[in-house]
Image: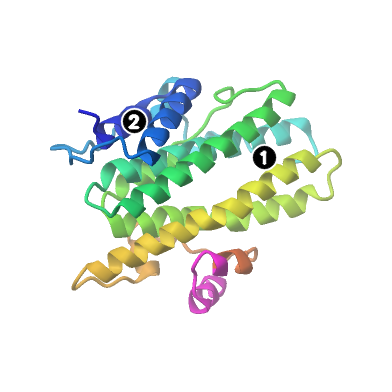
Amino acid sequence: MNNYFTHIKDVLIQSKTTEKFDKFHKLYEEFKNNKLEFTQLDIVEIFQEPSYKDICNIVSPNDVPKRQNLNTQEGIINLLHAIAHIEYSAIDLALDACYRFQNMPRKFYEDWMEVASDEVRHFLLIEKLMKQYGVKYGDLPVHQGLFDASMKTLELIPRMALIPRYMEANGLDANMFIINKLNSIPNTKEIRDVLQIILDEEISHVKKGDYWYKYGCDKKENFSCDYFKIVNTIYPNSFKKNKHINTLAREKAGFSKEEIEKLKSY
């Protein structure tokens, strides 16, 4: 049986990037051409390890190479590898949403397949930059924070609140900050251009998460959709004072002015 959910899991658990991306693109074409069945699986697996376990050395977040000093080649390499890991993880997050939530409207799968496709392209853009510095994905240690977050959110509302509306939205702030920082560093235009592409396109990803978060909240009776409470319940003290809020990007992504002001007030 040509079951979408069976195939999406097969792509999700594949670690080698070339095989993963080839399988994804083939599946995406079949999806767009309506060649798949959407029979829900009897068991939806809760994964114990991320797909990249075979190609990356996974360490504590405290042991991941620091990337503060972007004036050095080492700092740039650390930055690029960290972004590559975020993009690879984001591919899996989009695929996991498609796999895990099996009773959703078709638009849900259209949205997250599109996100996964964008994240693959982002990864390849960063991978091309890394090659110029003689490194590839997996050469540096990584942490599995995004994977852990996804396995802590196995229901739709918490997942959409934590992953797109919190973690990816934080990326809108961080990308803007990094681009501004690189503006004063010579020979980084190509990196800035790629980061700008990622920033611009990630707005739509967060907006999709915002849509499905609100969709879940509208469908769920007797459930308090307090965004800040949901995130803080999963990760206490998540909202720390941040002077680098990308207000315009967050507004485009669906955040209300009240939410943005509350973010700024922490």
What element does badge 1 sit on? loop
Asked whether residue 139 is drawn in magenta, I would say: no
Q: Residue at x 32, y 58 (%)?
A: 158
- Quadrant of the rendered structure where residue 229 is? bottom left
- Quadrant of the rendered structure where residue 70 is? top right
Label the magenta part by its dominant secondary structure. Answer: helix
The type of residue carrying mark 2 is: Glu
Q: In this view, does 153 lie above or below 37?
A: below
Q: How many marks?
A: 2
Give the residue pinned by disc 1.
Answer: 67
Q: Residue at x 67, y 40 (%)?
A: 67
* Residues rendered magenta in the picture: 251-266
Give the residue pinned by disc 2.
Answer: 49
Res 235 seen here: no
The type of residue carrying mark 1 is: Arg
| Lower position in the chain sequence, tag 1 or tag 2 | 2
